[in-house]
Amino acid sequence: MKGESAAEERLARERLPRHVAVIMDGNGRWARERGLSRIRGHRAGAESIREIVRTAGELGIGYLTLYAFSIENWKRPKREVASLMALLKRYLRRERAELDRNNVRLRVIGRIAGLPEDVRGAIRDAVRHLDRNTGLTLVLALNYGGRGEITDAVRALCRRCARGEISPEAVDEATISSSLDTAGMPDPDLLIRTSGEMRVSNFLLWQISYAEIHVTPVYWPDFRRGEFIRALLDYQGRERRFGGVGEAADPRPGSRSPGE
Ligand code: FPP
């Protein structure tokens, strides 16, 4: 579309977020408005994933983290959970070749041990298959909850303290960051939430401290390239202050300095 490409031209390629995190919401509402089953909504949502991953890779974004299945999602009807798992497995198997062609690496965060064995197998295969790639890192949050992740990190740190490997005084923000599932990744610069809700829903609680938040009323199955570009333009229009005045330095470890 002409309008879309004009928007794309306004994007400053040198000021793209390094890490974009997305709360993909609205599959159910999208389906209901069309008289379709929720499962059809999730299938349409998987199409959006395809398009957004491709676009993020093409633009040169470093990390894209998608909230694909939360710890709370187990409370959904059994049939819906089963089809979400099947969809995930199919996505990993079918998209592997395209992800590889696009130089995408895959990483997963969350309590992976709590997923069904066949899904874990599909994750293992896909991660291994893509591990030499150097482009976009696609991070799928599966059986994920931010508080659970922080709890696990605190437990791991306590164990290390009890074994005498580190002293409690040595525990700082960097130690905590590197004990989370996202260890080694930059924090998200931009958090996108689709379908209008103003909540963070237990997603990346530690990591989004300084993220810019873009909430759109658009349902996830309708969130395609044009919407993604609009979110990135919104991000580029923000003045990031990190708690300081004017263009202050990003305080996060390993972060770029302003102007870089
Ligand atoms: C929320 O919509 C969406 C999810 C449960 C997570 C996203 C899942 C997909 C996009 C399905 C495919 C996933 C992969 C990895 C292939 P909702 O059901 O909560 O929508 P509602 O709030 O309108 O009911």
Image (cartoon, rainbow, N blue to C red):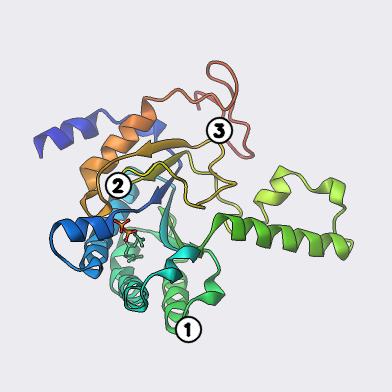
**Precedes in sequence: disc 1 or disc 2:** 1
For residue 256, which numbered disc appears in the image?
3
**N-terminal label among 3 and 2:** 2
- CA gap between label 1 and label 2 equals 32 Å
Ligand 1 located in image quadrant:
bottom left
Say what secondary structure mark 3 lies in: loop
Which quarter of the picture shows residue 77? bottom left
Residue 249 in sight here: yes
Q: Amino acid at mark 1?
A: Glu
Residue at point 38% right, 32% down?
A: 235
| Residue corresponding to mark 2 | 195
* Image-based side of 248 in relation to 5, left or right: right
What residue type is disc 2 on?
Answer: Ser
Q: Give the camera-side residue of 203 and 58.
A: 203
Q: Could you tell which of marks 3 and 1 lies nearer the N-terminus? A: 1
Q: How many marks?
A: 3
Kindly state the secondary structure of the residue where label 2 is placed: loop
Amino acid, disc 3: Arg
Asked if the residue at label 2 sits under 8 Å from ligand 1, the reply is yes
Label 1 Cα neighbours within 10 Å, binned few <14 / some 14-19 / many ≥20: few
Q: Where in the figure is residue 157, as x and y percent of width and height?
A: 76, 59
Measuring 33% from the left and 36% from the top, which residue is drawn there? 232
At x 58% / y 30%, what residue is drawn? 250
Is residue 50 visible in the rendered structure shown here? Answer: no
Residue 65 image position (x, y, % from top left): 44, 53
Nearest to viewer (mark 3 / mark 1):
1
Residue placed under numbered mark 1 in the picture: 117
